[in-house]
Image: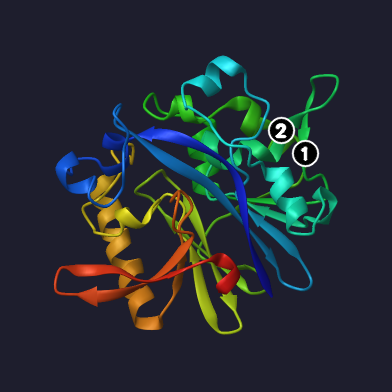
């Protein structure tokens, strides 16, 4: 099994939304912000070659949204989903499975593209698309708070393709890759846990977006159930300490992955890793 870091692009997010009720004076010691209170954010995907399957976890923003929409998110840099996949030595048609942690705009947008006729179609047309059933039902009947993050052009083509597989419970969905479903960030957030030669690797998605979110109360303000997120983080981080998991950080600009350890102040980061070192 091999793991590859897939950098799909970068954007900026408001620091207050990233860390919720934690005062800026505290969180800025852990994660930098500019004069406009904006933090530089990676939009990292993960490619897993199991030997039999080539699995892509999340797909970033994509390139089909209009300039006005994208301008609100301050995109920058020249990373892209397709370029990163090619740099890893793969082509779009090599992808056998796409696991979407959830259907917010910055996690699933790259799965769908507009062709030369402006029609929507799957970018990875040979791949199964895995989404939790809870998230699918939640995203296709969105609440007023999350509705701007669930875009029809990102979501509906997934079902129309006939490739959509809805996951109803925790467990292994692909040999070597199990998933666990969470409810705090958004209903049905589905995070993969990869077994790489006995080493467990958690793709932490928006449960722990950046390393500075590891402390339990450092919870994003856009989580729908922040107290649930805290409980979920506590359970998964204890497991990560006990079993020495590696945690892949999807949105941390500087840190791709880390392990965690118990400290007098609670669970904190330990070893900093590149995905290529896992």
Crowding near the residue tagged with mark 1, few <14, some 14–19, many ≥20 C-alpha atoms within 10 Å: few
Please identify the quadrant where the N terminus is shown: bottom right
Left or right, 63 with respect to 17, comes to right
Q: Position of residue 158 (x, y in %)?
A: 69, 38
Instruction: Give yes or no for contact between labels 2 and 1 (Cβ–Cβ under 8 Å).
Output: yes
Does residue 26 sit above or below 52 in this rendering?
above
Nearer-the-camera pick, 152 or 211: 211
Left or right, 266 with respect to 187, comes to left
Whether residue 23 is visible, yes or no, is: no
Q: How is the image coloured?
A: rainbow
Q: Which residue is mark 2?
A: 157
Q: Which residue is mark 1?
A: 161
Residue at 34% across, 48% down: 184
Does residue 184 sit above or below 155 in this rendering?
below
Q: Secondary structure at mark 2?
A: helix
Does residue 269 sit above or below 12 in this rendering?
below
Left or right, 131 with respect to 38, comes to right
Residue at 68% across, 26% down: 64
Left or right, 27 with respect to 264, comes to right
């Amino acid at each position: 099994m091999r793991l590859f870091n897939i950098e799909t692009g970068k954007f900026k997010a408001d620091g207050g939304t990233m860390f919720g009720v934690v005062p800026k004076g505290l969180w800025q010691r852990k994660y930098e912000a500019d004069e406009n209170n904006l933090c530089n954010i990676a939009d990292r995907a993960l490619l897993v070659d199991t030997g039999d399957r080539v699995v892509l976890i999340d797909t970033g923003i994509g390139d089909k949204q209009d300039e006005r929409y994208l301008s609100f998110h301050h995109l920058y840099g020249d990373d892209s989903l397709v370029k990163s996949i090619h740099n890893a030595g793969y082509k779009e048609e090599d992808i056998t499975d796409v696991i979407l942690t959830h259907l917010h705009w910055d996690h699933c947008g790259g799965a769908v593209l507009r062709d030369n006729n402006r029609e929507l179609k799957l970018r990875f047309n040979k791949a199964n698309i895995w989404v939790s059933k809870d998230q699918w039902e939640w995203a296709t009947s969105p609440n007023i708070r999350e509705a701007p993050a669930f875009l029809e052009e990102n979501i509906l083509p997934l079902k129309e393709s006939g490739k959509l597989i809805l996951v109803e419970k925790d467990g292994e969905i692909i040999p070597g890759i199990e998933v666990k479903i969470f409810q705090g960030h958004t209903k049905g957030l589905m995070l993969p846990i990869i077994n790489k030669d006995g080493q467990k690797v958690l793709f932490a998605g928006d449960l722990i977006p950046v390393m500075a979110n590891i402390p339990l109360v450092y919870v994003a303000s856009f989580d729908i159930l922040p107290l649930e997120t805290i409980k979920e983080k506590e359970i998964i981080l204890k497991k990560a300490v006990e079993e020495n998991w590696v945690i892949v950080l999807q949105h941390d600009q500087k840190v791709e992955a880390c392990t965690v350890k118990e400290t007098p102040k609670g669970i904190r980061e330990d070893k900093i890793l590149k995905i290529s070192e896992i």
